Image (cartoon, coloured by chain):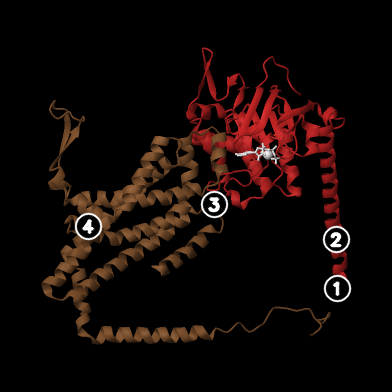
């Protein structure tokens, strides 16, 4: 043991950092694997990158991307988030009727697979070729307000968006509920003590703070929804990215390059969404000190998991 | 300082409250006149917090009645039958009662100014501009005018509590309730909050304060109420209750408080002397 000298006080630290030889080995292995992949991608003509890029730019593919995939995601997530938050608030309300309705809703839509739900909804026209909206049992008396042609609707995008949105709301309800419960009870009490009504307290004080917890999983849900729009085919909706690329692949017998085109588009869309998610997290994390930074790290981790 | 008017501002009669069969308040009677400052003392678990929360209906009471400024809290008397008020109307009753919490409970996603402006704009429908002018006055009053755009997490506990007081005052309450406003604070921050409260009392605000700060009780309170086990054991001017308590339970509580205060003072003194000793030693090392 060396005795510290009392006259010579230690100055700026100049020490060797910890060595990480394992990392260098890992980097070498990864580089080799990447080189192998690149070489096969370049040398094997069946990849046909040129054709894949060509497919990505085809009009039907672009239309499918914009309408079925992007619009489908946007629409179903809007329905899902809005209805999900309503369901969560209902689930946590003091009103037993609202609690029951919310419970039954989430129970049903979480139990039915999305593909099955869409296929079933697509066939509703079999039960109700024409839907009458009016007073129950009032058809004979002419008490019908509106008529909907279900068969005509069943393979329209709106109907698909509705189906995905209804399903999503059940998951969003659980996420929103967890978010609302994560807000300290003292916040509600402080708002109530100031004379704020329960609705205003929820909207102005609790939900904005719950967003911090709600946004990261909602980002994941959105990204999952981009991919789930490919299920719209269950409803015979064909204006959708994967169906359109696949159709070109089957027609030209270049199936693999067509799939690659779909994969590349999904990668582009999801990457952009992840950037948007990071921005939202920063916005709703304001006033919480270091939390946004932590959430961002969390996000990169989630991104790595997928 | 207390002005004598006929009707007390707070009139609580035989208030009882149980949690899951555990009776926490066992028939509390309390009148607080306009402009009066009442300090509520009592050991932990005696029901002080619960009683404060009953006054502004954060808890519903099981028995008894509470009037604040002539309004029956939580109920409406229609021809001799009590009808429970809707949540909206209870919210309206709370507007005139300010409350400060032990843990401040500022809104963390809003700046200091937004915290204060929120209720006047949302509840009273005041214009944002008007509310902000008023908020800046209030921040001045609590000595926080230099930090209107800070977030609560950027403030010390004492600063947060002063903002919380300003937030409550922004609704122009007739009554202020304080639940141990300084007990979550570091000792050196207690004084700044007590000063704001003292100024408020001097300005004629009616206040019910739960606190263990004996100095504040002695100097500022018009009346001290000692609670234990869900009942009021003893009440009177501080000179009587604190200096010459009549009841055995009050005496026991006060002597325990005094011991704690002394132990605390000793601990602080030890820390201070240890620190100054370390400071004295420091130059010797060079
Ligand atoms: N929400 C609740 N549910 C169940 N029991 C409760 C609840 N709130 C308070 N109590 C109980 O009521 C009793 C009185 O609590 P209260 O908080 O009013 O005491 P207090 O006098 O404020 O004590 P302290 O000085 O520790 O703050 C305690 O025994 C407590 O456990
Ligand atoms: Mg308490």
Mark 2 or mark 3, whichever is nearer to me: 2
* Residue A202 in the image: above or below residue B221: below
For the residues marked 3 and 1, what is the alpha-carbon distance in whole angstroms? 44 Å
Closer to the eye: label 1 or 2: 2
Chain where mark 1 sits: B
Q: In this view, does A130 lie to the left or right of A195?
A: left
Q: Distance between the residues labelled 3 and 4?
A: 41 Å
Q: Where is residue A62 in the image (x, y as percent from the top left)?
A: 20, 63
Please determine if labels 3 and 1 lie on a single subunit.
no
Q: Can you tell me which quadrant of the image ligand 2 is in?
A: top right
Q: Mark 4 points at which residue?
A: A232
Contact, CB < 8 Å: mark 1 with mark 4? no
Q: Name the residue under label 2.
A: B274
Labels 4 and 2 share a subunit: no
Circle 1 SS class: helix
The crowding category of the residue bearing disc 1, from other C-alpha atoms within 10 Å (few below 14, some 14 to 19, many at least 20), is: few
Please, which chain is the residue tagged with disc 3 on?
A
Q: Do the residues labelled 1 and 2 touch (CB within 8 Å)?
A: no
Q: Quadrant of residue B131?
A: top right
Q: Name the residue under label 1.
A: B285
Q: Which chain does the residue under circle 2 lie in?
A: B
Instruction: Please determine if labels 1 and 2 lie on a single subunit.
Output: yes
Q: How far apart are marks 4 and 2 (CA)?
A: 74 Å
The residue lying at 31 percent from left, 50 percent from top is A109
Give residue B217's position: percent from left, percent from top.
78, 34
Do tag 3 and tag 4 residues touch (Cβ < 8 Å)? no
Q: Is mark 4 on a helix, strand or loop?
A: helix
Callout 4: 10 Å neighbours few (<14), some, many (20+)?
many
- Helix, strand or loop for disc 3: loop
Could one spot residue A276 in this view of the protein?
A: yes
* Chain letter tied to brown: A
- Quadrant in the picture for residue B234: top right
């Amino acid at each position: 043991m060396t005795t510290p000298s009392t006259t010579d006080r230690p100055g700026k630290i100049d020490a060797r950092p910890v060595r990480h030889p394992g990392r260098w080995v890992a980097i070498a292995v990864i580089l080799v694997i990447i080189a192998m992949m690149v070489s096969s991608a370049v040398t094997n003509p069946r990849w046909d990158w040129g054709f894949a890029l060509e497919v990505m730019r085809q009009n039907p593919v672009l239309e499918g991307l914009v309408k079925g995939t992007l619009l489908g995601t946007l629409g179903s997530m809007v329905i899902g988030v809005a209805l999900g938050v309503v369901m969560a608030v209902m689930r946590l309300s003091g009103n037993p009727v609202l609690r029951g309705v919310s419970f039954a809703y989430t129970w049903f839509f979480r139990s039915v697979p999305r593909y099955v739900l869409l296929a079933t909804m697509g066939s509703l026209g079999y039960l109700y070729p024409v839907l009458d909206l009016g007073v129950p049992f009032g058809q004979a008396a002419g008490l019908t307000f509106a008529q909907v042609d279900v068969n005509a609707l069943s393979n329209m995008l709106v109907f698909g968006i509705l189906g995905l949105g209804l399903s999503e709301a059940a998951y969003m309800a659980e996420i929103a509920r967890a978010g609302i419960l994560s807000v300290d009870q003292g916040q509600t009490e402080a708002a109530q003590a100031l004379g704020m009504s329960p609705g205003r307290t929820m909207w102005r004080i609790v939900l904005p703070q719950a967003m911090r917890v709600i946004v990261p999983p909602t980002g994941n849900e959105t990204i999952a929804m981009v991919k789930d729009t490919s299920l719209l085919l269950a409803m015979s909706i064909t204006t959708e990215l994967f169906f359109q690329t696949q159709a070109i692949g089957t027609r030209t017998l270049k199936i693999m390059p067509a799939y690659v085109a779909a994969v590349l588009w999904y990668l582009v869309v999801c990457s952009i969404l992840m950037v948007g998610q990071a921005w939202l997290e920063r916005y709703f994390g304001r006033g919480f000190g270091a939390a946004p930074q932590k959430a961002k790290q969390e996000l990169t981790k989630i991104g790595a998991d997928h | 300082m207390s002005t004598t008017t006929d009707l007390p501002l707070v009139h609580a009669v035989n208030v009882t409250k149980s949690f899951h069969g555990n009776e926490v308040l066992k028939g509390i009677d309390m009148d607080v006149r306009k402009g009066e400052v009442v300090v509520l003392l009592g050991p932990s678990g005696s029901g002080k917090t619960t009683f404060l929360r009953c006054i502004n209906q954060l808890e519903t009471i099981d028995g008894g009645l509470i009037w604040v400024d002539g309004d029956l809290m939580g109920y409406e008397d229609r021809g001799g039958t009590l009808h429970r008020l809707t949540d909206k109307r209870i919210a309206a009753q709370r507007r005139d009662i300010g409350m400060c919490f032990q843990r401040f409970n500022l809104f963390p996603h809003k700046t200091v100014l937004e915290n204060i402006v929120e209720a006047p704009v949302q509840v009273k429908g005041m214009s944002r501009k008007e509310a902000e002018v008023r908020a800046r006055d209030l921040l001045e009053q609590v000595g926080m005018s230099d930090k209107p755009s800070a977030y609560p997490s950027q403030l010390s506990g004492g600063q947060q509590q002063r903002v919380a007081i300003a937030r409550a005052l922004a609704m122009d309450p007739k009554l202020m309730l304080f639940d141990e406003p300084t007990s979550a604070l570091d000792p050196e921050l207690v004084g700044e909050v007590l000063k704001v409260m003292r100024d408020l009392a001097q300005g004629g605000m009616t206040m019910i304060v739960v606190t263990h700060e004996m100095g504040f009780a002695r100097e500022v309170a018009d009346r001290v109420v000692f609670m234990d086990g869900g009942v009021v054991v003893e009440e009177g001017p501080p000179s009587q209750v604190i200096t010459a308590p009549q009841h055995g339970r009050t005496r026991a509580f006060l002597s325990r408080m005094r011991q704690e205060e002394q132990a605390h003072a000793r601990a602080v003194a030890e820390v201070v002397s240890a620190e100054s000793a370390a400071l004295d030693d420091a130059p010797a090392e060079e």
